[in-house]
Image: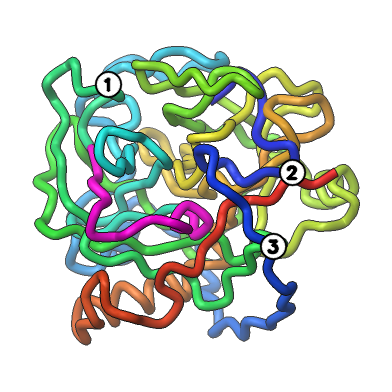
């Protein structure tokens, strides 16, 4: 994460080669939306049977402050995940259940799911705090309509080999209902171990977090030459200076909807540069992808799909973001 920006039209994954693919324009017919907003007592249903609480910070006592690019305290972002191949961090993810993570589909080009390890419960990229829980990823399911040119439907569900044990440092973030609105100006939190500066591949040892504001959709669409879709949401500041960057891809944009409870508004997807003025970060909008996410979790839980390494719908088709002019 920079206290500045994303890509030069890039996905925010960590430096992968981009292969040009034919542009596919596909329409996704969403199921009927739930018309009511989540309440403190109803949020758990979105976790199915996977978790009894979500969006909490039981290991963190200080309030979230609107500052940019600061070290996160352990337990401050308990749903944050580092995805690694060997010792190399390549993307972030968010815990949404004891067996389930969400990340960006573009993270998984040129990766073998069987070689991906999820590191949770830590703010240390290299595990120096001794608190990391390491779990193998068994399956990566990108959205079947993921478009690697437009980075539309840029979301993937990851299944873990063994369940996580929730504690004060490991918690799931809440999934919003499809009808939930994240209004322009609402303050949310981004986090990750991505680059600290645009063009500088140096990654922080300690998890970075910053507060950003939701950007009006029409304004952001104009700033990006009308290239946004309904599956995208923008956050940051029009003056720049605070943003996600390469290596932050797949990480959470979490908003405190009710006191002490955070909902996943987006996952880091793409942007122009990192923290550039008038180029806020673009995130996959979870409310528009929630229907597919929940359907996929049900499918994986009750109707097992082929394991990682075997051909499956959409597996291995995600690409990193292109560089746009």
Alpha carbons under labels 2 and 3: distance apart: 14 Å
Residue range (magenta): 104-119
| In this rendering, position of residue 15 left or right of residue 167 | right
Secondary structure at numbered mark 2: strand
**Quadrant location of the C terminus in the rendered image:** top right
Percent x, y of residue 113: 29, 60
Marker disc for residue 260: none
Q: How is the image coloured?
A: rainbow
Q: Residue at horizontal 38%, vertical 46%? A: 93
User: Closer to the observer: label 1 or label 3?
Assistant: 3
Give whichever of 265, 199 is nearer the camera. 199
Q: Is residue 126 above or below residue 180?
A: above
> Relative to 240, does residue 186 appear above or below in the rendering?
below
Residue 285 as seen in the image, left or right of residue 43: right
Which residue is under mark 1? 124
Residue 102 position within the rendered picture, expressed as x and y whole percent measured from the top left: 38, 55
Residue of label 3: 20
């Amino acid at each position: 994460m920079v206290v500045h920006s994303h890509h030069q039209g890039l996905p925010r994954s960590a430096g992968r080669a981009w292969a040009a693919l034919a542009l596919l324009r596909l329409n996704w017919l969403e199921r009927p939306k739930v018309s009511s907003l989540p309440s403190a007592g109803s949020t758990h249903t979105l976790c199915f049977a996977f978790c009894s609480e979500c969006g909490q910070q039981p290991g963190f006592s200080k309030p979230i402050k609107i500052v940019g690019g600061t070290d996160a305290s352990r337990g401050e972002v308990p749903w944050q995940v580092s995805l690694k191949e060997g010792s190399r961090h390549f993307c972030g993810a968010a815990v949404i259940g004891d067996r389930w993570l969400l990340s960006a589909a573009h993270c998984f080009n040129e990766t073998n799911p069987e070689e991906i390890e999820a590191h949770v419960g830590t703010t240390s990229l290299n595990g120096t705090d001794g608190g990391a829980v390491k779990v193998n990823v068994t399956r990566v399911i990108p959205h079947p309509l993921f478009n690697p040119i437009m980075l539309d439907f840029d979301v993937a569900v990851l299944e873990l080999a063994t369940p996580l044990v929730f504690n004060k440092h490991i918690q799931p973030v809440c999934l919003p209902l499809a009808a939930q609105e994240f209004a322009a100006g609402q303050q949310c939190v981004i986090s990750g171990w991505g680059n600290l500066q645009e063009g500088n591949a140096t990654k922080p040892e300690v998890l970075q977090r910053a507060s950003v504001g939701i950007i009006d959709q029409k304004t952001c669409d104009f700033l990006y030459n009308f290239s946004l879709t309904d599956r995208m949401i923008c956050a940051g500041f029009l003056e720049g200076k605070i943003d996600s960057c390469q290596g932050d891809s797949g990480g959470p944009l979490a908003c405190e909807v009710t006191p002490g409870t955070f909902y996943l508004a987006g996952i880091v997807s793409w942007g122009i540069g990192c923290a550039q003025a008038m180029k806020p970060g673009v995130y996959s909008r979870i409310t528009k992808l929630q229907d597919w996410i929940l359907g996929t979790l049900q499918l994986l839980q009750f109707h097992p799909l082929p394991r990682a390494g075997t051909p499956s719908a959409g597996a291995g088709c995600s690409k990193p973001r292109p560089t746009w002019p």
